[in-house]
Each structure stands twice: as C-alpha cells, then as structure tokens.
Amino acid sequence: MSIEKRNNGSLLPANPRTLFDDFFSRELFNWGNNNYSSTLTTLPSVNIRENPENFVVEVAAPGMEKQDFQISLEGNLLTISSSKKNEAEDKNDNYTRREFSYQAFQRSFELARDVVDEEHIEAKYENGVLKLTIPKKEEAKKRPPKLIEIQ
C-alpha cells in the first residue's frame, strides 16, 4: 500500500476513516485506475487528432452497441453521450436472482468556431471504438504557404 498526497497537503488523511473508505471503494487489484469520476462511474478515454482536412475523435467504449450512442453538435459544442441498461433474471425452485446494470456517460468538446463542415460529419462504431470524422470547411483548411515571386 502506498501513501498518497491528500487535498489538505498532508500525506496521511485528516480522518482515518477516509483511508478505509478509499480502500473499500476502489477496485481490489487496480489501485492506479484514475479514470473514475467522483460518482464512481467510468468515463471513456478519448483521442482527438487534427489533420489538414478534418478532426478525428475516437472514444473507447467497449461493450456498447451503436444504438446506445447519441451525438449532437450545437453551435461549436460537440456532445457524445451513451446509456445502456442490462437486466437478467434467473429463476429456480428455491430462489430467484435478478441482476441489472446501468452504464451512462456524457463528454462534451468545444470545437473551433466556423471551422466544422456540419453537413459531412461521419460516425462509425467498430471493435469497441466510436470514431467521428469531422471535416473542416474549405476556407478553414490549412494551405501551404504561398510563395511570392520577387520582381
């Protein structure tokens, strides 16, 4: 077990109960997992790349289906959200077991103003990765420098 720095600047928690709360609220073998929000839900990892023609956004969301996602662009705010609900019931002579789970997340990204060609955005979900290709408007694409001839 390692000692972690707390918000109050101390290496040890001000309240020893916090140490036990941390121990029981984390995954048993994954103490280094920093991808948890304050509500103990996971947020998917996101990669954003820009090239001269477009932006590419990749969201790691394994176990989802393409119908679980909702993508919207309002002004220059791109929002990607998802929710998935699973229920299972096992009935036997002596017992009934019901299990359910619910996964949801929402991520928003602010895009540069007047750069995105909204009509040609493409989204594809494959092998656990949601990939958005967001083309740039023609006037926003980077052009090579123009050489000016000296006369």
Image: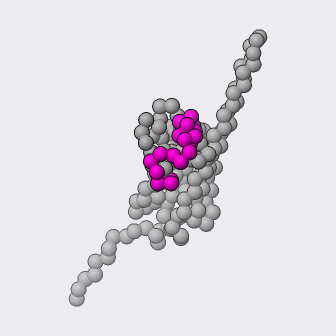
Q: In the picture, which quadrant includes the N terminus?
A: top left
Out of 130 and 53, give the one closest to the viewer. 130
In reply to whether residue 23 is colored magenta, the answer given is: yes
* Picture quadrant where residue 119 is located: bottom right
Note whether residue 124 is visible.
no
Task: State the image coordinates of residue 49 (x, y, percent, origin top left).
Answer: 43, 56
Q: Is residue 101 above or below residue 14?
A: above
Residue range in magenta is 7-25
The colour style of the image is one colour
Please state if 4 lies on the left or on the right of 150 as rendered. right
Q: Is residue 147 above or below residue 142?
A: below
Note whether residue 2 is visible.
yes
Q: Is residue 144 above or below residue 53?
A: below
Q: Residue at x 62, y 45 (%)?
A: 39
Out of 88 and 137, give the one closest to the viewer. 88
Q: Residue furthest left?
A: 151
